[in-house]
C-alpha cells in the first residue's frame, strides 16, 4: 500500500513537459477504477505547456476517469469534481460555473465562500440525478440568476445552459441484450 494506506496503482499514464524537465502521472488505475491524479497542478512547467491540457482532455474523452485525487484530499467522483484544469463537461464543472455566476450576479446570496464546495456538490448531484427535468430546472435557475446581468453575464449564462443541455442529453450506454435460454434445456 501507498503511504496513505490506499492500494497501489496497477497501471499509470503520465505526461511530460515539452522541455523534458517536468513529468507527472495523470491516470492511475487502482482497484479497477480510473483515477485522475492532479499532481500536474503543482508543476508550473506542466501547467504552462500548451499541449498538456489537450492531452488531459483527450485522455478524459477516450479513456475516461471515474475518480479524481485532488492534492491532500480523498478521492472524489470525477463527475462531481470542480474541474478548472481542462475541458470536460461534468456535473461538477457546470455546478462550479453556476456558483461563480451566482456569486457575480447576486453576491449577497453567494457571499460565503466557505459554502462553495457544498453548494457545488449539491448542484452537481442535482444534475446527475435529476435527469432531463432536473437539467431544465437548473437551466431556468441559471436564466433567473443572470436575468439582470450585462452582455458578458448573459453570454456566460447561455454557455452554461448549453452545457447543461448537453450534459442532460448524454446518451446512456446501450444495455446488453439478454440471451434467451433455449426451451429445449
Image: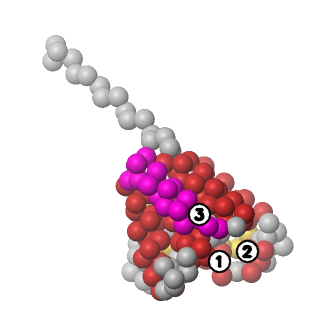
Check if mark 2's residue and mark 1's residue have beta carbons within 8 Å: yes
C-alpha distance separating marks 2 and 1: 6 Å
Residue bearing mark 3:
147
Please tell me whether residue 70 belongs to the stretch shown in magenta. no
Residue 13 x/y as whole percent: 61, 63
Residue at the image position 84 percent from the left and 73 percent from the top:
19
Residue at the image position 44 percent from the left and 55 percent from the top:
137
Q: Residues within 10 Å of mark 2 (few under 14, many from 20)?
A: some
Residue 66 x/y as whole percent: 47, 60
User: Which label lies toward us, 3 or 2?
Assistant: 3
Mark 3: which secondary structure? loop
Residue at the image position 45 percent from the left and 82 percent from the top:
115
Question: Which disc, if any, is residue 182?
Answer: none
Q: In this view of the protein, which residue sits in the foreground, 16 or 142? A: 142
Mark 2: which secondary structure? helix
Residue bearing mark 1:
41
Quarter of the image with the N terminus is bottom left
Please report whichever mark, 3 or 2, sits nearer to the chain's N-terminal start.
2
C-alpha distance separating marks 3 and 1: 35 Å
Residue bearing mark 2:
47
Residue 172 x/y as whole percent: 45, 41
Please report whichever mark, 2 or 1, sits nearer to the chain's N-terminal start.
1
Q: Residues within 10 Å of mark 1 (few under 14, many from 20)?
A: some
Residue 11 x/y as whole percent: 53, 62
Q: Is residue 53 left or right of residue 60?
A: right
Mark 1: which secondary structure? helix
Work out whether residue 126 can be spotted. yes
Looking at the picture, does residue 178 appear above or below residue 43? above
Specify start and end residues of the magenta stretch as a single range.
Answer: 130-149
C-alpha distance separating marks 3 and 2: 35 Å
Amino acid at each position: 500500500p501507498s503511504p496513505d494506506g490506499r492500494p497501489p496503482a496497477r497501471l499509470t499514464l503520465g505526461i511530460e513537459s515539452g522541455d523534458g524537465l517536468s513529468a507527472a502521472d495523470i491516470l492511475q488505475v487502482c482497484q479497477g477504477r480510473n483515477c485522475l491524479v492532479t499532481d500536474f497542478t503543482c508543476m508550473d512547467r506542466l501547467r504552462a505547456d500548451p499541449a498538456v491540457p489537450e492531452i488531459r482532455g483527450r485522455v478524459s474523452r477516450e479513456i475516461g476517469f471515474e475518480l479524481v485525487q485532488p492534492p491532500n484530499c480523498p478521492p472524489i467522483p470525477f463527475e462531481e469534481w470542480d474541474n478548472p484544469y481542462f475541458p470536460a463537461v461534468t456535473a461538477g464543472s457546470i455546478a462550479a460555473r453556476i456558483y461563480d455566476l451566482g456569486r457575480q450576479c447576486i453576491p449577497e446570496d453567494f457571499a460565503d465562500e466557505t459554502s462553495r464546495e457544498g453548494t457545488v456538490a449539491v448542484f452537481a448531484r442535482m444534475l446527475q440525478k435529476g435527469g432531463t427535468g432536473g437539467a431544465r430546472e437548473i437551466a431556468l435557475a441559471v436564466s433567473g440568476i443572470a436575468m439582470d446581468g450585462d452582455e458578458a453575464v448573459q453570454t456566460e449564462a447561455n454557455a452554461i445552459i448549453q452545457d447543461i443541455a448537453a450534459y442532460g442529453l448524454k446518451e446512456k450506454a446501450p444495455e446488453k441484450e439478454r440471451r434467451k435460454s433455449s426451451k429445449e434445456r
